[in-house]
Image (cartoon, rainbow, N blue to C red):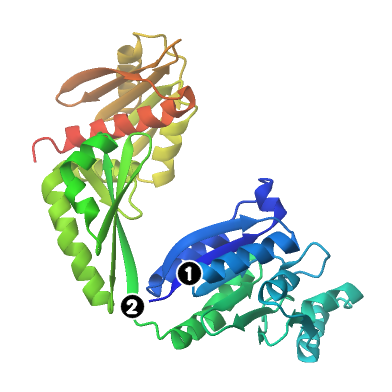
């Protein structure tokens, strides 16, 4: 099975001016083909450095995909860099220039002389017409490698990848495997606790298990590779069943599920309505609940609540909204740690928690929100 590397070019990415979304898209596409992606790299708009990166990747991987640097300006160096990496010159392709001219004329413009640069590709390259832009792509083949250079504009890159590159890769490398990933979301416990419970599964080779910790949430990634979707689904399902057996209610959802969405769904199942207030959270709790657009959330507001007064404010919110359940969350920064108060009022009564957050203060609102939502979720399902 071939190994792939991605090289993203663009000084604007290194300067933090734009966010690289192409790598994520390419990684998922390669995953669906069963191709192992071992490394991604970002290089500025420099011919020598891009060429060096391509040469290095050729030693490690069969498939090298570059994005960006195929425009008409001087600081679009990928064509020259790839040519330099494999020791050839670039050559003008009249048919590419014809395609570019027609595309520009469709926009109601006249081609400029510098746009001819886009009709140059490394000598011997397989040219790929761009039906949605003016930057053609190309593929360079060696005995071992396929070097594929795609435009940096996301929609153009995605179109060429789906229409031309994926069929090429499937044929060239006889790709018949798929890789699938399943995410299990957990809350209320730390990464170390999860590791204690399922650490032995993290040493598996196929399927594999990995952990990713966030503020108050830990994701468990299950990835499987097999010749068919049916086989990968079976492998993932068996392992997921084992993980759920070990962790139980710690798992609140999968894949695109969110903690706030799951919590509101549980409230809807019980027929309860929720009101919420917050203090010191910068609107995080209310924004997340509102974004779900579930009618069981009746609304709420951010307040300035003195420490120790959260209970009264939460009770007032419940009364004001005529809600079945009310949640109050407050964060109070301290010199050494952040204090968190949570108040939950349900038809069964009132409960309060005082928690301490020792991480970066700016992470406290998100952590407090996740801890509070998890408490609501577990309280609702406690008798099940």
Q: Secondary structure at mark 1?
A: strand
Which residue sits furthest left?
A: 383
37 sits left or right of 159 in the view: left
Residue found at x 22% / y 58%: 204
One can see residue 112 in this view: no
Q: Is residue 328 above or below residue 240?
A: above
- Viewer-closest of 315 and 19: 19
Q: Badge 2 is on which residue?
A: 177
- The quadrant in which residue 230 appears is bottom left
Q: Secondary structure at mark 2?
A: loop
88 sits left or right of 254 in the view: right
Task: Please provide percent x and percent y for residue 349.
Answer: 17, 21
- The quadrant in which residue 6 appears is bottom right
Q: Badge 1 is on which residue?
A: 4
Residue found at x 49% / y 80%: 166
Task: Please provide percent x and percent y for residue 258.
Answer: 34, 46
């Amino acid at each position: 099975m071939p190994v792939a590397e991605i090289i993203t070019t663009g000084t604007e990415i290194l300067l933090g001016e734009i966010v690289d979304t192409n790598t994520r898209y390419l990684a998922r596409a390669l995953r669906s083909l069963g191709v192992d992606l071992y490394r991604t790299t970002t290089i500025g708009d420099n011919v020598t450095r891009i060429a060096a990166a391509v040469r290095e990747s050729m030693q490690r991987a069969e498939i090298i995909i570059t994005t960006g640097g195929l425009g008409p300006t001087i600081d679009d160096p990928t064509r020259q860099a790839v040519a330099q990496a494999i020791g050839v010159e670039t050559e003008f392709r009249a048919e590419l220039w014809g395609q570019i001219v027609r595309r520009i004329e469709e926009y109601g413009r006249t081609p400029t002389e510098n746009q001819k640069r886009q009709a140059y590709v490394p000598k011997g390259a397989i040219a790929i017409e761009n039906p949605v832009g003016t930057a053609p792509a190309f593929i360079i083949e060696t005995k071992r490698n396929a070097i594929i250079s795609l435009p940096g504009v996301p929609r153009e890159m995605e179109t060429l990848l789906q229409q031309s590159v994926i069929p090429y890769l499937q044929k060239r490398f006889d790709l018949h495997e798929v890789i699938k990933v399943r995410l299990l979301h957990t809350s209320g416990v730390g990464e170390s606790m999860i590791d204690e419970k399922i650490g032995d599964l993290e040493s598996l080779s196929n399927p594999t298990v990995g952990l990713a910790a966030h503020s108050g949430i830990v994701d468990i990634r299950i990835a499987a590779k097999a010749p068919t979707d049916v086989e990968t689904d079976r492998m993932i399902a068996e392992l997921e069943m084992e993980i759920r057996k070990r962790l139980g209610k710690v798992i609140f959802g999968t894949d695109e599920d969110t903690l706030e969405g799951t919590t509101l769904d549980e409230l809807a199942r019980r027929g309860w309505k929720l009101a919420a207030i917050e203090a010191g959270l910068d609107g995080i709790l209310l924004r997340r609940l509102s974004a779900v657009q579930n009618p069981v959330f009746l609304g709420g507001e951010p307040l300035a609540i003195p420490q120790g007064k959260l209970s009264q404010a939460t009770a007032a919110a419940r009364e004001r909204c005529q809600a079945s359940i009310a949640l109050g969350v407050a964060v109070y920064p301290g010199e050494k740690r952040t204090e968190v108060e949570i108040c939950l009022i349900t038809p069964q009564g009132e409960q309060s928690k005082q928690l301490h957050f020792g991480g970066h203060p700016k992470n406290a609102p998100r952590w407090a929100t996740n801890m509070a939502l998890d408490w609501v979720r577990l309280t609702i399902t406690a008798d099940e």
